[in-house]
Image (tube, rainbow, N blue to C red):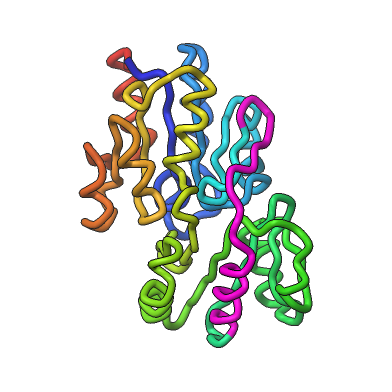
Amino acid sequence: MIKLVASDIDGTLLPEGQRDLNPEIYDIILELKKRHIPFVAASGRQLENMQMMFTPVADEVHYVAENGAICQYNGEKFVLSQFNRELAMRIIHELEKFPDCKITVSTPNTQYIKSGDERFYNFMTTHVRYHTTAIDSFDSIPEPIIKIAFINWETHQECYEHFKALFEKEIRVAKAGNLWVDFISFDSNKGTALKFILEKMGLNRNEAIAFGDQQNDIEMLEYIGKSYAMAHAKPDVKQHATDIAESVEGTLRELLEKGL
């Protein structure tokens, strides 16, 4: 019996290139609620951004944000992980050697980018719709760092491979979407955050299902008893799931019709 549904957003609920969710998911979330089945949105995105995306049903959703560093359960926010400061600064300073890599540094309350890049600031605030703070130096960030990421429009694969080789023994380097790369603590990911929420609810992993499509979904797909990789996912992601789905909405509609 399914007692919890979790889903990634980008590339899973939200097709590449789109900014708004299919409104059908809101109706499905409400139908799940009627059957006492909570819905968890699990993403590398900022918590406030995720809540905005689910505005019509925002209070009916639990959230795993920043790749599991933060979660919100029953309206209460929990910071589950933060970076070792020395490691964070080494990653950031190495990233700064690559001008094509646009860096974002997340904290529990905002996301920092470097001052002086108005185009990137507008991209993050207007297109991505993140709460963003421009700062002269990442060294002066006053809060705990919970995620580092970069977007690269020109040499994405090359930069991903470089940073993976450089830091993979210290931190997980994972693709998140077609252009983003996330640095994720080994002890904090979507899987560990879902484990936290399931324990709060008194459920086990075999009473849940999850959907994902990228490398930053792997731990979640592995942990949850029945997991769906999206049909367009790469083979290295699909091998960690138990099933394949063409769409989250379509799969959940089928399951609802069958009584879950």
Residue 128 part of the magenta-drawn span: no
Residue 77 part of the magenta-drawn span: yes
Question: Would you say 77 lies left or right of 255 here?
Answer: right
Q: Is residue 140 above or below residue 253?
A: below
Q: Residue 50 appears at what percent x and percent y?
A: 60, 44
Residue at position x 21%, y 49% in the image: 239
Question: Would you say 178 lies left or right of 235 here?
Answer: right
Q: Is residue 152 above or below residue 33?
A: below
Question: Would you say 223 lies left or right of 239 here?
Answer: right
Q: Residue 61 appears at what percent x and percent y?
A: 57, 29
Please identify the quarter of the rendering in which residue 171 is found: bottom left
Task: Tell me the quadrant of the picture where the N terminus can be found.
Answer: top left
Q: Residue 75 appears at what percent x and percent y?
A: 68, 28
Q: Is residue 143 above or below residue 26?
A: below
Question: Would you say 119 lies left or right of 67 here?
Answer: right
Residue at position x 49%, y 76% in the image: 152
Residue range highlighted in magenta: 73-96
Q: Residue 118 appears at what percent x and percent y?
A: 73, 77
Residue at position x 57%, y 47% in the image: 69
